[in-house]
Image (tube, rainbow, N blue to C red):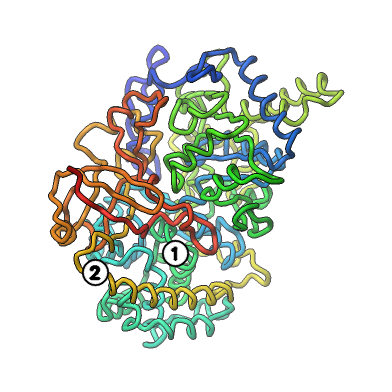
Amino acid sequence: MDVEDGRVTSVRGDPDDPMSRGFVCPKVVGMKELHEDPDRLRQPVIREGDGFREVSWTEALEHAGSGLRAVRQRHGKDALALYQGNPTAHNLGLLTVGQVVMRSFGTKNLYSASSADQAPQMLAAEEMFGNPVLMPVPDLDRTDFLLIVGANPLVSNGSIMTAPNMKDRLAAIRERGGKVVVVDPRRTETARVADEHIFVRPASDPCFLLSLMHVVFAEGLTRSEALYGRCTGWAELEALAAEFAPERTVEISGVQPDVVRRLARGFAGAERASAYGRVGICHQKHGTLAAWLIYALNVVTGNLDRAGGAMFTTPAVDVRKLVRLLGFVGHDRWKSRVRGYGEVAGELPIATLADEIDTPGEGQVRALLTCAGNPVLSAPNGNRIDDSLSRLEFMVSLDGYINETTRHANVILPPASGLERSHYDVALNAFTVRNVAKFVAAPLERPPGVLHDWEILLELAWRIRWDGWRLGKWLRPNAMRVGAAIGPEGMLDVLLRTGPQRLSLSKLRASPHGLDLGPLEPSLSRVLETPGQVIRLCPARFAEEARTMLDDADAAELARRAMPAGSEAGLVLIGRRHLRSNNSWMHNTQALVKGPERCNLLMHPDDAHRLGLEAGGRVEVRSRVGSVVVPLEVSDEVMVGVVSLPHGFGHDRPGVAMRVAKQYAGVSLNDLTDDRMLDVMSGNAAFSGVPVQVRAMA
């Protein structure tokens, strides 16, 4: 970033960065516009009538702290809920000091974006490998066969697979004679550059993956010499896969038996292969099974923990130890009060937050603290969340905008801009396709009186938990002084020095372009955290759930066949993302949202013809929980029976102070997704496969 007179004048990729090699994603370019955005709050605001007024930090923090403290005193610790959004993963202060502070509140009502996109993968990783962040990533730069199921890395630039410039990396696989195959209900941007795209029905991925496994076992294509002795449950998985012959699963997944057999033989026969799944496999009723089967397919074909396969990183910050220290390791240690969903990595499913607010009784959520999150647009049944937030006794938001969620807050506390804080990728470096480390100093100086988000949390924690102590007047300034002295960078230095690479913050400062720490290395013996350091290949409850799934899928297929031929029903909804509008918090950036209309419904020509719908017309899409009206785009990009809406739109709610976003308001996909549709095992929201009806509007 070029800076002149306290302003960023240009943003470019660093060609000497060992990981990016000069590539940047659109979010980085958007940071300049976000920083300069006149809609971004610079001062705290307090609700006054139907609007907000600017106040001093002292008044805002006192009001926020006393409001939250009063709710806790009247109703107990669990009356306060906390929600963290996606930007937390890109924020050093929130990932270090912030996590410690938020867990100090002692509430069981912790929520985050994890249960909207990755809880199944975390649960599967913990069951198989002993830690929720032990999620292997494709050794992308050495693989010969990349199988992608329910992921679109060309748009996400990798997700739980940090890999800048996916376009060139995928092209490199093909140039060295390798193969890329994408399995998805939509011909995504990634599928268009792959060797092959295979349509699969939404929410049927576990059946499809088990049919692949069936062929691998039945035709003797396993490679057991490397990992058989490191696993329990090999025979049990083989017995389970035997029940999922491709001839049986074809009616469920829509993938023909000859395609399944050809794909299984090609993947298992490749010298170095890696299977990878992401958000699409998580967004379904059996998302944990799909995540487990991706990992298991890598194991039985001998492709786990080997060059070119699925490997574990050796990051400079040992995230495994960090999550254990913070209490993230474990699941089902407590359950949600209303619907009884177990926690995963210390958090409850966001899909049940509205239940906890709306249902009276002991432990009812009556106050909420949100941090860099917008669940009204990102959680299922957003209208219900929207309505529930209006009934809270008190709400505080750490956010730079008055958005669809924060408009309900009593106090909004805006942190320093992303350009005013230093950065180290604690989370994303744990899943890179090559081991790297890089520290970036803040490009701009923080103006006087502006607080970082972790500092705001420390101030709130003091007022909520410790203000009544007799020694408070003496302890508070000293505690705050110590916290500020250590801060995120002090914690980072300790984590680097005690990490596997034995680095330090001073070493990273001396290498402003970053350090290349080498390719991924076999590390199973070092990283496994299960008892006896074995891979639990076929956990009993996973196998039991798979058999239940098969019975349910058979019944659902019979019901589908019985549907009238001309019915407006029989459609299922999936989401999608665009490269320049990944998340709702980027939609107030003109450079990213400009261009053709993106918020439209994709429908296959056969379905449009069957329902008498025309491209460009406006259609009503209706689900169990709500309806939206949206322009129709007719395209064979989606398979027959599937319709698709993009994620993150819906900026037309009253009170939202985001002028650019309102110009491109669109409709919210999550006004249609169902908060009763969850992954059975993890509680992750099942955004894909939502039954909908579509009809023309006058």
Element at badge 1?
strand
Q: Position of residue 224 (x, y in %)?
A: 48, 81
Question: Mark 1 to mark 2: distance in Å?
Answer: 45 Å
Find the residue positioned furthest to the right. Answer: 470
Discs 1/2, front: 2
Residue 413, labelled with which disc? none
Q: Is residue 194 above or below residue 477?
A: below
Residue 583's x, y, as percent?
Answer: 38, 40
Q: Residues within 10 Å of mark 1 (few under 14, many from 20)?
A: many
User: Which residue type carries mark 2?
Assistant: Pro
Instruction: Check the image and report above or below for 214 versus 357.
Output: below
Question: Can you say which quadrant of the picture contains the C terminus?
Answer: top left
Tag 1: amino acid:
Ala
Q: Which of the pair 630/547 is nearer the observer? A: 630
Q: Residue 277 or 615: which is nearer the viewer?
A: 615
Residue drawn where x is 61% and y is 38% of the image: 492
606 sits to left or right of 99: left
Q: Quadrant of the N terminus?
A: top left
Q: Earlier in the sequence, mark 1 or mark 2?
A: 1
Viewer can see residue 24: no
Looking at the picture, tell me which residue is in the foreground, 664 or 26: 664
Left/right placement of residue 529 relative to residue 426 reads right
**Residue designated by label 1:** 310
Q: Which SS class for mark 2? A: loop
Circle 2 residue = 564
Residue 254 in sight from this viewpoint: yes
Horizontal arrangement in the rendering, residue 507 relative to residue 640 (left or right): right
Asked which quadrant contains residue 264, the reply is bottom left
